[in-house]
Image (cartoon, grey):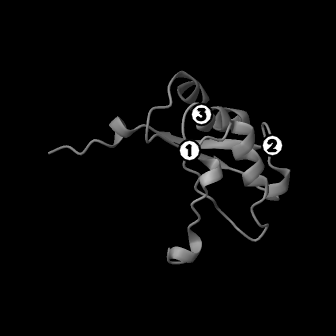
Amino acid sequence: MPALDAANVSIEDRLYGASSEGLLQRLREVPADVESVMLVGHQPAIQELALDLAGDGAELARVRAKFPTTALATLLFAGDWSELGPGSAELVAYVKPKELAIER
């Protein structure tokens, strides 16, 4: 896995208040040679995007029920970013912050 450096991070002000469609449009602009993306966003757009993209996945009901601050939905998509659309990905993991509690 390549090391993370400033060249691999993009902070885009236009995404701050973007709708789920705006977030999707930005993902469709990702260059084809980029293998993975982490998109950090706000409610309700980020939850709506995850639900729109996920055509399948055991955790869909949980994502639908609640998507709290700092939740992480991991979606798998095998295709060109420009073809990303509703139902084209699989929800492979969903973690809420309270599930990461450290036992002492």
**Mark 1 crowd level (few <14, some 14–19, many ≥20, 10 Å Cα):** some
Q: Residue at x 56, y 44 (%)?
A: 41
Could you say whether the residue bearing mark 3 is in a helix, strand or loop?
helix
**What's under tag 2, amino acid-wise?**
Gly
Numbered disc total: 3
Could you say whether the residue bearing mark 2 is in a helix, strand or loop?
loop
Instruction: Give the labeled residue for mark 2.
Output: 85
Please give the label number shown on residue 22: none
Q: Earlier in the sequence, mark 3 or mark 2?
A: 3
Residue 60 coordinates in the image, percent (x, y): 61, 30
Q: Horizontal placement of 78 versus 1: left or right?
A: right
- How far separated are the C-alphas under marks 3 and 2? 15 Å
**What's under tag 1, amino acid-wise?**
Gly
Name which quarter of the figure residue 101 lies in: top left
Q: Nearer the viewer, mark 1 or mark 3?
A: 1
Q: Residue at x 81, y 43 (%)?
A: 85
- Please identify the quadrant where the N terminus is shown: bottom right
Could you say whether the residue bearing mark 1 is in a helix, strand or loop?
loop
Name which quarter of the figure residue 63 lies in: top right
Residue 32 coordinates in the image, percent (x, y): 79, 67
Of all residues shown, which one is farthest toward the top?
65
**Mark 2 crowd level (few <14, some 14–19, many ≥20, 10 Å Cα):** some
Q: Residue at x 78, y 37 (%)?
A: 87
Instruction: Give the labeled residue for mark 3.
Output: 47
Instruction: Give the labeled residue for mark 1.
Output: 41
Q: Mark 2 and mark 3 in contact (Cβ < 8 Å)?
A: no
One can see residue 57 in this view? no
- Please identify the quadrant where the C terminus is shown: top left
Q: Mark 3 and mark 1 in contact (Cβ < 8 Å)?
A: no
Q: Earlier in the sequence, mark 1 or mark 2?
A: 1
Residue 45 coordinates in the image, percent (x, y): 62, 35
Q: Earlier in the sequence, mark 1 or mark 3?
A: 1
